[in-house]
Image (cartoon, rainbow, N blue to C red):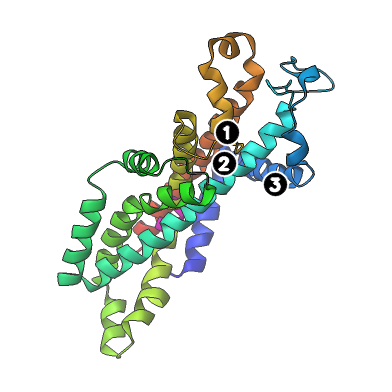
Amino acid sequence: MNSTSAWRIMWKEIYSDKVALVSLILFCVIVITVYIWALFIDADALAIVNLRTRNLAPSGAFPLGTGSAGQDMLQMLILSARNSFNIAFLITGGGAVIGILFGLVAGFYGGHVDNVLMRILNFVGMVPAIMLVIVFVQLIPNYTSVTFALLMIVVFAWQGTAFLIRVKTLQQGRMEYVAASKTLGTPNFIIIFREVLPNLVSIIVSNLTISLASNMGIETGLTFLGFGLPFGTPSLGRLVFYARTPTNLTERPWLWLPAALLIIIMMLCINFVGSALNRAADAKKRSH
């Protein structure tokens, strides 16, 4: 089955599941709205302290109230969401590239190549990714780079993808079309990327969807704990961080509750779509 058929099966599964379809539409609407709206927000002006408007409750002028520095929390929510989405998408994409390449090579070649790569994979996977990120951030004092935070998470966010793709590639390697291609003298590089990889599309997309929800939670959790994005960089985790102050938690929910609700909504949407994609992957597997 080619990649076109895989995409058709995935769309049919999502379309037949109304919850997944609504979740996909809502996810796209939120993401597009955030990125377009953020283009019209002056981040520098938002960073200016305005004591006259600090800690105001939601009103017509400020639909989500204001923060301790007088900033418009609706605009802060949009900028924070954009940054968190950027991080989640980049982590997911970067981890997917590493994990897919690693898994394809290990599963296709097998033997000593597989043994060596699996030793590396097992070594990297011995310690939870979040713990490794926290350790590396602590070893580099006063880091201020968003890129560094991103790379630290990407480096340790691909093991699950690599394991999955390796197993699926081992299964594909036993198929007749792979043996036929090898008999015809087709280069291994061509077999891997032109024949094996398209047959893994549904599995990869399903895994990416689940990883996206997980990575959104990782960024938010690390930033909330103080080990994610550098201080001063707007993110959903930074807004939820306001809830750690008892006064904000009970008397100023507009500072943190919209960000928490947005995180929950996004993760639910991703999970509903991911469930439909998992069923599509199972349907594709049964069709072979």
Which residue sits at x=55%, y=26%?
240
The residue nearer to you, when weighing 188 against 21, is 188
Q: Look at the image and tell me whether residue 175 can be seen.
A: yes
SS state under label 1: helix
Would residue 173 appear left or right of 133 to someone viewing this image? left
The residues colored magenta run 202-206
Q: How many marks?
A: 3
Q: Where residue 45 sits in the image (x, y, percent)? A: 78, 37
> Which residue position is annotated with label 2?
84
Q: Is residue 169 left or right of residue 46?
A: left
Distance between the alpha carbons at the discs numbered 3 and 2: 11 Å
Q: Are marks 2 and 1 in contact (CB under 8 Å)?
A: yes
Residue 236, numbered label = 1
- Identity, as a three-letter code, of the amino acid under mark 1: Leu
Element marked by disc 3: helix
Q: Amino acid at mark 2?
A: Ser
Q: Nearer the viewer, mark 3 or mark 1?
A: 1
